[in-house]
Image: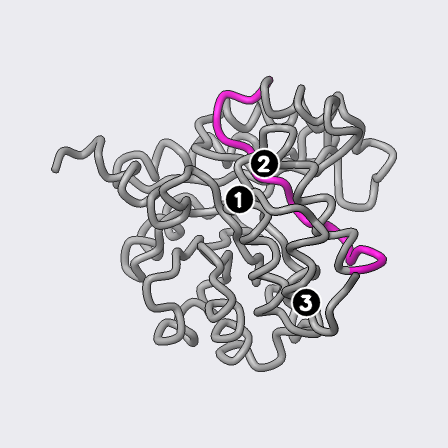
Amino acid sequence: MTHTSWPRRRMHHVFAPDGRAVIAAMDAGIKGVAPGLENGRAAVRRIVDGGVDAILATIGLARAAADELGGTGLILALDSEIPSAQYGVSQAVRWGADALELKVFPGNPSVTKLGELRELCAEADKYGMPVMAEPIPVSFKDVEAHTLTNVANGARLSAEAGADFVKAQYVGTVDEFRSVVEGCLVPVLALGGPMKPTPVHALQMAADAVEAGARGVVYGRNIVEAERPDRMVAALVEIVHGGASVKSAAKHLNPPLG
């Protein structure tokens, strides 16, 4: 196997044969004990049981729950107080991760982290390690900056910096978000963001994102804080991989929704 084959092989551990993915973001522990992740190993076990393609986790959770993952893909979250390119890639290789993740903040007057992303992508490429970028315009709190144009530009800037795939906010209508997907040079996954009013709202956003051309979703709170995370994952899998309607996929949820 040639060096250039390794990124593709690792991507196959994140994306299913249909080129799509349902990923559970389980990296909230970077801020301490997080809802739904109190017992990290049990949380990973439940989500794996639901059929998730990969999880996004900190190094601590990845180590603690290694036995629960089985063949499920692992994306290592590298968000840190210091530049992470050097230690992050070596950690990912050591722990058998399939990809790395870094959040960047295009338009932030203090720090965009786009330079760190370029360095990370260059270092990761030496080891055939894919990188997923998560561009958030300006900051999480500056929601007025999370416009369609800024989200599209952030996705494109991440791809231009060398990211292999991008986790982007779903904004606008299906037709509008399609411009984000088509303007990016690499696969786009829609992030879940805050808890939706109901699980059906979360499923609908996944369906809309896929209709717009996204390759799937990366959901955090909308999976891990669900009443039954395994059933929420199963419902998302039906939509992303099976092309099911929201109404049909919602039958996986407990209690059933009409």
Q: Position of residue 247 (x, y in %)?
A: 72, 52
| Amino acid type at mark 1 | Leu
Q: Position of residue 113 (x, y in %)?
A: 59, 36
163 relative position to 216: left or right: left
Q: Please give the range of residues in magenta.
A: 183-198
Q: Which structural element holds mark 3? A: loop
> The N terminus appears in which quarter of the rendering?
top left
Dot 1 and dot 2 residues touching (CB under 8 Å): yes
Q: Earlier in the sequence, mark 3 or mark 2?
A: 2
- Distance of label 1 from label 3 (alpha carbons): 31 Å
Which residue is label 2 attached to? 113
> Quick one: which residue is furthest to the left in this view?
1
- Distance of label 1 from label 2 (alpha carbons): 9 Å
Q: Mark 1 or mark 3, which is nearer to you? A: 3
Residue at (35, 55) in percent of width and height? 97
Q: Earlier in the sequence, mark 1 or mark 3?
A: 1
Q: Position of residue 241 (x, y in %)?
A: 50, 46
